[in-house]
Image (cartoon, helix red, strand yellow):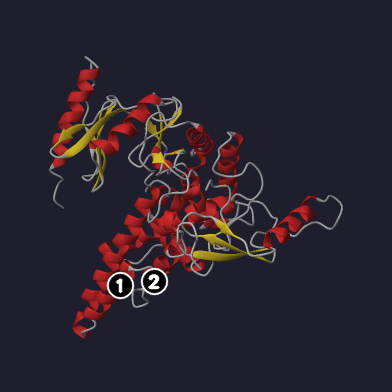
Amino acid sequence: MTPNPLLPHLTAQAKAAAHSRTTACPCGATVTLADRPDATVVRHADTVAKAHAPDITPSDLTPRLTTATHLPDLLLPPLSPTPVDLHGRLVTFWPYGTPVDPEDPDAAPWEEAATLLARLHRTPAPTPLPAMRGPAKAALAVARLRAAAGAAQTSGTDHLTAGTDQTAATDQTAATDLPPATDLPPDTTAVLRAWHTLPAWARAEAPQPDSTTLCHGDLHLGQLVRHPAPDGPWLLIDVDDLGVGVPAWDLGRPAAWYACGLLPPDEWDRFLAAYRAAGGPAVPAHGDPWPALDVPARALTVQTAARAITKALAEGRLLDEVEQSLVDACDRMASLPPELTQGYAK
Amino acid sequence: MQCPKCHAPMHTYNRNGVQIEQCSGCRGIFLDYGELESLTRLESQWSQPAPPPPAAPQAYPAAAPQAPAWGAPHGGHHGGHGGHYGHKRHKSFGHMLFSS
């Protein structure tokens, strides 16, 4: 493994930022919280520094930071409202908050997460914002799967002289709206077929049918912290995908986990009931929520399955039981058209 | 069929025997001759108090909580205390519920 050359610089920045906030830093080690291609996050004492994805520009990020600055009861506010440049990467600084404990499912703050989302969705955007990036992220995950599966297929079969034809078939699939070719591995084919059941907006091929509702865009349990640590109120973090769009997208992951059998019905019920009790606009107050949830839950099931297969291909391993349950759901949804959605303005 | 407004393809859905076309792009709905009247008639049947209870929407049995038709066979129609969730829940919780 090559160490990330950005990491020592980001570490130094986090330390300097922490020391600018207090004269008496306990000065323990700087901890790496995340180091992925799309984000590197380090913590020094009560300060967190995040290097955002290389393709993020100041015009993408600044209005999102402004939103967090204006809504400190919903979103963890940054220490400074403007990003700084570090070797071509935008860096932001945040106060440390206590995350959800991955070892303790019973303590997961489902009600708090749902209530924060409902309040966010009811809040007018405090500044003009780009579109929420959920559908774009799903499309990216599917494009990466196509590339990885196509490459694996081509490299695995070129000695059979089939490589050229298959590359052509893959390209054609990517360029048109036809259902995917069936010469890819069955798991990949199931995911791509499920993707093709989705409307254009959910695949980031058309604008979302809501251009005013404030959305988080990437809700999962890693996106909640208590601030001030360790027992302050829960807040949402990570504004990289925040924007205006279809608010049901923010409920889509819990809905997908529930539909795929990964989240028990009682926990899903608690989440949905709390969202409704807080007046969240993404689903009707009573009755069946699935006409509104179906498309986002499908899209996020597809996205998660696509990432799982891409990762398994890169690691040369089979899918585990949890990952397989997502692919199985894709397989089932491919034969069922999405629910009729209701209530969107023309 | 193509949407007259944004020209995206339209998909056909069946709702209580009424064929409805919805645009995959702008989500607009197209009704054939007489379909609006059919829907109005169905709506009035729903709101009448006495007659036999209206059928639940086809895809979802009345049991709560509801789940999509493509959901896992165990995904939602019985309580959450079975061994299934105890097993898969712990495995999926830290693994799947914390990442993008």
Q: Could you tell me the amino acid type at mark 1? A: Gln
Tell me if label 2 and label 1 are in contact, CB under 8 Å.
yes
Q: Is residue A21 left or right of residue A246?
A: left
Residue under pointer 1: A172
The quarter of the picture where residue A273 lies is top right
* Position in image of residue A318 (x %, y %): 34, 67
- What residue sits 40% from the left and 60% below the top? A305
Q: Could you tell me the amino acid type at mark 2? A: Leu
Query: What crowding class fits label 1: few (fewer than 14 Cα within 10 Å), some (14-19), or many (20 or more)?
Result: some
- What residue sits 53% from the left and 46% below the top? A345
Give SS at disc 1: helix
Whether A79 is drawn above or below B15: the answer is above
- What residue sits 39% from the left and 48% below the top? A134
Residue under pointer 2: A178
Q: Can residue B56 be seen at all in this image of the molecule?
A: no
- Taking depth in this image into account, of A58 and A108 the one nearest to the observer is A58
* Position in image of residue A226 (x %, y %): 42, 29
* Position in image of residue A43 (x %, y %): 26, 32
From mark 2 to mark 1, how far is it between C-alphas?
8 Å
Q: Which chain carries label 1?
A: A
Query: What crowding class fits label 2: few (fewer than 14 Cα within 10 Å), some (14-19), or many (20 or more)?
Result: few
- Mark 2 and mark 1 lie on one chain; the one further toward the N terminus is 1
The quarter of the picture where residue A96 lies is top left
Whether A123 is drawn above or below A250: the answer is above
Q: Mark 2 lies on which chain?
A: A
Q: Can residue B33 be seen at all in this image of the molecule?
A: yes
Q: How many labels does the image show?
A: 2
Q: In this view, does A184 lie to the left or right of A215?
A: left
The quarter of the picture where residue A300 lies is bottom left
- What residue sits 49% from the left and 33% below the top? A116
* Position in image of residue A296 (x %, y %): 48, 52
